């Protein structure tokens, strides 16, 4: 965290905005009337403030979290991809989009050109996905790491830290 850097926004966010974001990060589907009751403000206030944060680009849509484990996809592998040429990144990303098990792909600097998160039913399923990634034109090699257990998946800590800086 950089304490000496100030964040520059086109709008001013206050503690009510912070509380609204805190609630929405936890449950993006919560009705504005419920947020208003929790914060003891009018539903119109919530609507106006959320709209302001959407217009500013601070809030970008809302998401739905799926429990892939309950659907049988509890195996997670992270796959680092080295390319033959960096100019093939767009084509490789396009081909990765065709593999449903690739749930996240980052373009990175360092050891890998692309770093992916793969969800699978088990090791055999993951092996097939990784082999499919290896076959993509432009891929030089892959390196896989198995996720043993997720310990941090926190969308709030950074947000709270940012609000302390404002």
Image (cartoon, rainbow, N blue to C red):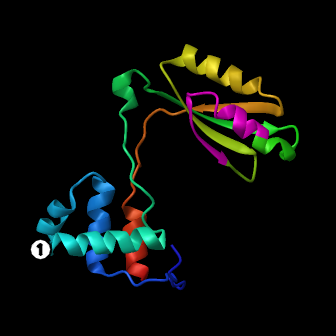
- Residue found 30% across the figure and 74% down from its top: 48
Which class describes the residues within 10 Å of circle 1: few (<14), some (14-19), or many (20+)? Answer: few
Query: Residue 27 in magenta?
Result: no
Q: Secondary structure at mark 1?
A: loop
Q: Please identify the quarter of the rendering in which residue 161 is found.
A: bottom left
Q: Which one is nearer the viewer's eye here, 45 or 99?
A: 45
Q: Please identify the quarter of the rendering in which residue 127 is found.
A: top right
| Residue 101, horizontal then vertical, whole percent | 55, 28
Q: Please identify the quarter of the rendering in which residue 45 is found.
A: bottom left
On screen, residue 134 above or below 58: above
Q: Which one is nearer the viewer's eye here, 122 or 23?
A: 23
| Residue 20, horizontal then vertical, whole percent | 27, 68
- Residue found 49% across the figure and 81% down from its top: 9
| Residue 121, horizontal then vertical, whole percent | 47, 19
Q: Quadrant of the C terminus?
A: bottom left
In screen coordinates, is 16 left or right of 139? left
Q: Magenta region: which residues?
A: 91-106
Q: Which residue, as the protein is rendered here, is positioned at the far top?
A: 124
On screen, residue 165 above or below 64: below
Q: How many marks?
A: 1
Q: Which one is nearer the viewer's eye here, 38 or 46?
A: 46
| Residue 115, horizontal then vertical, whole percent | 66, 42
Residue, disc 1: 40
- Residue found 75% across the figure and 37% down from its top: 92
């Amino acid at each position: 965290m950089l304490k000496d850097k100030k964040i520059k926004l086109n709008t001013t966010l206050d503690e009510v905005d912070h509380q609204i974001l805190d609630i929405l990060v936890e449950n993006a589907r919560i009705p504005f009337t419920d947020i208003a009751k929790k914060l003891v403000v009018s539903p119109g206030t919530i609507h106006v403030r959320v709209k302001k944060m959407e217009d500013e680009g601070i809030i970008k849509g809302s998401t739905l979290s799926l429990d892939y484990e309950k659907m049988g996809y509890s195996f997670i592998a992270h796959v680092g991809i080295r390319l033959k040429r960096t100019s093939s990144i767009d084509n490789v990303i396009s081909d990765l989009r065709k593999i449903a098990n690739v749930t996240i792909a980052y373009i990175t600097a360092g050891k890998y050109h692309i770093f992916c998160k793969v969800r699978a039913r088990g090791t055999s399923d993951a092996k097939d996905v990784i082999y499919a990634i290896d076959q993509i034109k432009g891929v030089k090699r892959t390196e896989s790491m198995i996720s043993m257990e997720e310990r941090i998946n926190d969308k709030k800590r950074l947000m709270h830290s940012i609000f302390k800086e404002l």
